[in-house]
Image: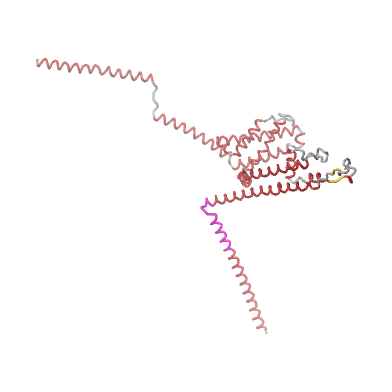
Amino acid sequence: MTIDTKDETSSKSKNVHFRSKDNEPYEDNKKASNKSGNEHERPAQATPETKIIQEDKGKGALASIQRFRQKCGDFVNSQVISIFIIILILVNSVMMGLATFPFVTESSSVYFAFEIIDLIFLIVFTIEIVLQLIFLGPALFQDGWLVFDFAIVAFSWGFFDAPSRDPNAGGGGSVKIFRAFRIFRALRLVTRIESLRDLVTALLGVMPRMAAIAVLLLIIFYIFAVMFTDLFGDLYRKGLTEEDYFSRLDLSLFTQFGMMTLDWAGVAREIMNIQECKEEFKDCDCATEEENCEKTFTWAWIPIITFVMISSFIVFNLVIAVICDAVAVLHDEEEAEEAAENDVDPAMLRKKVRVLKNQVNELTNSQTQMLDSIEFLTRQFKMAELSKRSKKSS
């Protein structure tokens, strides 16, 4: 029994060992078949090295684009190109002015040459704005002057007509009006000149106060327009004036605008010289019977001069004072910025300047006193020598 048990035990162990050996190749084949099936079902995953290479390629492309944009910006914003563009703007502006003279408009060949040159200017300005757009991207539209230049170039192309030998050829008056706006390219010179740029900045800074002054001027205009219409509204209807100055409110406002520019004497004299028939000679002819007529508006200078003084002198001087104040504030801000950069207090700096001025004045006074003393000693020395010589001679 013991032997049988051992044999059975050994046989079981052998069988187990045998089955395990048989199973091992089966499991390996199964794993191999699963791997081959998975290889066919899904693609191989990218390795970390592949990802790094792809990222490097993307960074290289972006770096090359950035270098190209920087080169465009360095080129278009270089000093040589800026001066070249300024010269082109000046020449183009002068040529657009010359194009209005008869020697251009009456000669088809000269007019055609001007059109070709203007097209070349437009192409150059377009290349410039395209380079600026490549360099700045959407940030270009944050610069007001570049936006203005972009709009001018876009309008020039939008209403572009092919160069023609006929000055009257084109798309009509509206297109010519839009094309006339090309002269506003000259405003780009403001951005190149620091003093003009500061003045424009100052004007933009005082716009709120200028708006208040404009409201005040509008109130003054309206008050005097109603007054003039009531006082002199029927003069043109009666045939007493050659021009219709005050028959309606809008005409009164237009006349007042001319008077505000100090063109008021002619209107005042014409109204003051109006003659009407006296009450006892209602049907007289003042052109032939001056003795039966009288001047009825000799007092017209009073409201006219009052309006001119208020509108021209007071309001305009107020505008000038506001602008000067804005320029002074701008100058003070520049000094404060320079002092902040140098870590200097403007008040302390002014105090030191005053002290230095006093010291310079003191040194000047002491130098003057020293020169006077030297001159006095020189005279004394000369007098002593003369006295010695006189004694020796005697």
Rendering coords of residue 242 (x, y %) = 82, 40
Answer whether residue 192 is visible to the viewer in this image.
no
Q: Residue furthest bottom?
A: 394
Left or right: 146, with 283 as reference point? left
Q: Which residue is at the front of the view, 59 or 327?
A: 327
Q: Main secondary structure of the magenta part?
A: helix
Q: Residue furthest left?
A: 1
Left or right: 271, with 19 as reference point? right
**Total marks drawn?**
0
In the image, what residue occupies the spot 70% across and 44% down?
Answer: 220
Taking the magenta stretch, the answer to whether it contains residue 353 is yes
Left or right: 295, with 104 as reference point? right
In the image, what residue occupies the spot 27% across and 17% down?
Answer: 26
Q: Which residue is at the front of the view, 36 or 247?
A: 247
Highlighted range, magenta: 339-360
Q: Which residue is at the front of the view, 151 or 309?
A: 309
In the image, what residue occupies the spot 54% across and 56% down?
Answer: 349
Locate the N terminus and report the quarter of the image it occupies. Answer: top left
Q: Above or below — where is 391 with respect to 273?
A: below
Answer whether residue 232 is visible to the viewer in this image.
yes
Q: Which residue is at the front of the view, 220 or 149?
A: 220
In the image, what residue occupies the spot 80% across and 44% down?
Answer: 271
Rendering coords of residue 303 (x, y %) = 75, 47
Taking the magenta stretch, the answer to whether it contains residue 132 is no
Rendering coords of residue 154 (x, y %) = 63, 33
